[in-house]
Amino acid sequence: MHHLMSHLNNMERVRAAIQVIKTALSAGMAWELAILITHNDYPYFAPLASVLVGQVTIADSLQKGINRTIGVIGGVLVSMFIGHWIPLNALSVFLVVLMGMALSTTLHMNAQITSQVGVSSLLVLAFGQEEAYIMGRIIETILGSAVAIGVNAIIVPPNEVPTAEKQISKLSLELAAMLKKLGYLYEKNGDPSEALVETRKLASKMEAASQSLKLAKESLRYSPFYFKRREKLKHLILGMVRLERITIEVRGIARALCDLEDTLEFREGIVKITETTAKSIERFGEAVISPGRKMEQRLKDAIKKARIQQMLCLSGLNISKSIHIGSILTDLHRILNEVTLFIEQDCSFLENKGPGLSPREF
């Protein structure tokens, strides 16, 4: 698992470098293309649009391109109206920016369009209001945006699935480590309140993993490639659903430990159960990231060991003596049920449904 995390970290650095290269490449291509089409020796609107439109995902690039084009057209229209009546001075600059941004705000356009209207109206007012000049700037913006979207879609298309894998892997490892820590605290008769605080922090880490899945889904949107990655994403989403429920159970165990009375006769058994269940969570994370028969079998073996340990502990348990012990065992049992259902239901469902599956939205 740690080797996998290191590999995912390296991939993340490579993707960041590729994004920088793609942005620079699209800016240069937009400049040359704009010169050929508009016959303007300094088509600065084209590379500027490419740099601003280039985003991590194709969907974001497309949305940015649309927003920027709308903003440029709006700014040009406002500048033409003001510039026709008032020469370039402080008053005209004030009115152009004020009217442009006020109009877009009144029309409930987003912040990107509003700021672009102000910038474009100011530039056109300052550098020229001839019809040919104005049309050239609009064409340059459209060309620059189109180039950025095209480069982003064709040259090493964005793929944030590895980032989602990294987040899910981290979450599964942290859940397993937390469960082991809870067992260790119980064994050493430590203060479980500290662990309870830490388990509450798992909610933010779970949210980070969910956000990474959303970004991964967006990165594959409108992409003509990565069909296999889409299937992998479905697998990750189903795994994340299970991890959310496992997180709830781990927090429940931490709360039960805070209320637990000293029950020496069950201490060794509880520690062994938490260790074997934690190992099942680790194997579950591996099976989610690297699906296959081998990983599934390793997970099944871990689940089997954990269930045997649970049965051994239950055989000597008198719940009337400690209801909190029963609560802990119930939560541990639910964790094993979640990872078992992942194999029996989620994985088989993916195999049967294939490309037609549409997992729930995050």
Image (spheres, rainbow, N blue to C red):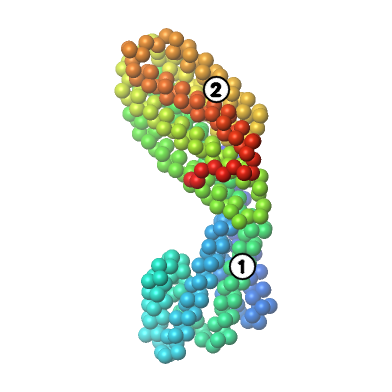
Around disc 2, counting alpha carbons within 10 Å, would you say few (fewer than 14), some (14 to 19), or many (20 or more)?
A: many
> In x, y percent, where is residue 298?
61, 25
Vertical placement of residue 294 versus 140, above or below = above
Vertical placement of residue 289 versus 79, above or below = above
The number of numbered badges drawn on the structure is: 2
Q: Quadrant of residue 189?
A: top left
Q: Quadrant of residue 223?
A: bottom right
Question: Foreground residue, 355 or 124?
Answer: 355
Q: Which residue is painted at 55% across and 18% down in the image?
A: 305
Q: Which residue is mark 2?
A: 303
| 308 lies left or right of 265 | right
Instruction: Examine the rendering and report whether any part of residue 99 can be seen.
Output: yes
Upstream in sequence: badge 1 or badge 2 = 1
Vertical placement of residue 85 versus 335, above or below = below
Vertical placement of residue 359 versus 247, above or below = below
Q: Which residue is painted at 58% across and 28% down in the image?
A: 344
Marks 1 and 2, how far apart in space?
52 Å
Q: Which residue is mark 1?
A: 146
> In x, y percent, where is residue 18?
62, 55
